[in-house]
Image (cartoon, rainbow, N blue to C red):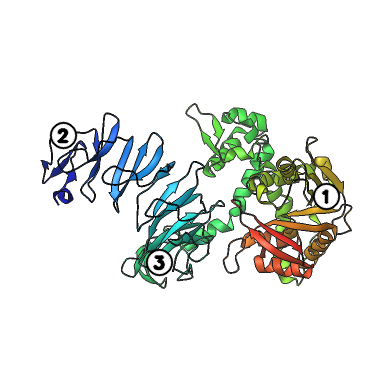
Amino acid sequence: MEWQRARVAEDGTHHVVSGEPLYDERFDEVLAFHAPGLAPVRRAGEAFHVDVRGRAAYPRRFERTFGFYEGRAAVRGREGWHHILPDGTDLYHERHAWCGNYQHDRCAFRDDRGLYGHLDPGGRPISATRWRYAGDFREGSAVVQAEDGRSTHVRADGALLHGLWFVDLDVFHKGFARARDASGWTHVDRAGRATYARRFAAVEPFYNGQARVERFDGGREVIDERGDTIVEIRPARATDFAALSGDLVGHWRTDTLAAAVSLGVFDGLPGAENALAERCGTPVDKMRRVLRALAELGVVTRRSDGDFIATPKGAFLCADHPLTLAGAALEYAGPLRERWTSLARALRAEVHRPDDIFREVARSPERCRTHHRMLESYARYDYEPLVARLPIQAGDVVVDAGGGTGTLASLVAATWPSSRVFVLELPGVPAAAEPSVPVRFVETNLFEPWPVSTDVVLFARVLHDWDDPDAIRLLVRARDALKPGGRIAIVEMVLDEDGPGGGLCDLHLLAVTGGRERTCRDFERILDAAGLRLVRVQTTPSLPQVLVASPA
């Protein structure tokens, strides 16, 4: 068992035992020995395995070789990746785009489509299912990542272990796995249940019943398996007083960005202080002050020649950016901020019905362009990754209810060119759309009977603008417009039943429109009241999810 004592020499060309060379041969690269006493080596562009005497274990040559794990070694040849046995023979005939090492009689691999799976001891896939990623097995399960970016655990036969999905996930260690949900990191048991209510910025695996964690305030502590603090090992880096003070002046950021957009600062970049001051009509000293604040916010930076330029984040505030948020800055600091001042009154009221913001926007052509340019950017950013998940078939008639200037409808028309796509909007809104938008606009009141019969209705961030009674009225109008076999797709953020995520967005809707964000149970309730049933919830890589409903 001399190979067990062997180590890679400092120059990486051979192996040594107690500092003495194990053999006379020298290679370009060597890796560690593994059972049954073979080590991967590479020389003159050829890779193979050698024994403790430095002799080749077999006559074959590969492009890369790796260590033997559970009697099998991953190798890369001209035709791709596969595994070999200690005598150099192939474990199986197939070739892969990549394969890992065997752990617990399973091995991860990637196919030519870039998708992952697992192999059994004979090199056969354990399941026909493929994933965006698949990791090694440990304690009877492995982590896999679905197309939408969420992760879960699978058993050795490829079946789901608990069926729960997380933002990020780790393998089990001593019965617990690190897991990240929308609120932060925690530990879960084999049923996928969080073992405590707290969430952290980072957690380590449990070791003898304890784990080191980092809180969101930068402090670190050691917790037990119930999530209780055993000892604090680093105090908070940001005190609660300082954090709350920062929250109280959050409007400083919004107002600064909006003022810079209004002055035209970002559209004058790159530029020097003097040139920007002249362009924007401000004294040089005041331009210097606003540039300092913008640099603190990370939206501009100063080059070595003295000129200021927009950072990648700041570029979104340029008017000509494809996803410009310049209009969003003006809206959030102006008309939408004004509505927030009524929040306390809205919270006291049994029913809060602010003035209809959509009619307010539609009455002003300039405001309509600004407001809908903001919505277009959010739509392009969020909807492009999910449009293929909509329940649409070739040739369908599709209605995008409250679809603004047609951003989502245009994506639908491009994805299903044989479909007819309509946008139902208030009078005045279609005039703000680009002339090239390949959809038909119909000016109407969504609360009145719809002038079109359709296979699919899209409600993309529309229902959350209304309280439950009005949302139900809209759903009834949509149901009545459906052809036989029709379906409704609701594109919305879905709140967790218990977590805090989305709370501020919910208050924003209350103050601005009188609407609300909803949980899945909330959607089921209003759908039922409208004579509809929830068929499925389709997760997406974006923040919004797709809820599909049909007549009950």
Mark 2 or 3, nearer chain start: 2
Mark 1 or 3, nearer chain start: 3
- What residue sits right under mark 2 in the picture? 25
- What residue sits right under mark 1 in the picture? 425
Circle 2/circle 3 CB separation < 8 Å: no
Circle 1/circle 2 CB separation < 8 Å: no
Circle 1/circle 3 CB separation < 8 Å: no
Classify mark 2: helix, strand or loop.
loop
In the rendered view, does 41 fall on the left or right side of 481? left
Classify mark 1: helix, strand or loop.
strand
Q: CA distance from mark 1 to mark 3?
A: 51 Å
Image quarter (top left, top right, bottom left or bottom right) of the C terminus = bottom right
482 or 217, nearer to the observer: 482
Q: Position of residue 329 (x, y in %)?
A: 67, 46
Residue 405 in which image quadrant? top right
Task: Give the answer, above or below, for where 333 lies relative to 64.
Answer: below
In the rendered view, does 543 fall on the left or right side of 187? right
In the rendered view, does 395 fall on the left or right side of 502? right
Classify mark 3: helix, strand or loop.
strand
Q: Position of residue 515 (x, y in %)?
A: 74, 62
Q: Is residue 193 visible?
A: yes
Q: Position of residue 73 (x, y in %)?
A: 31, 46
In the rendered view, does 197 fall on the left or right side of 9? right
Nearer mark to the viewer, of 1 and 2: 2
Instruction: Point out which mark residue 176 bears.
Output: 3
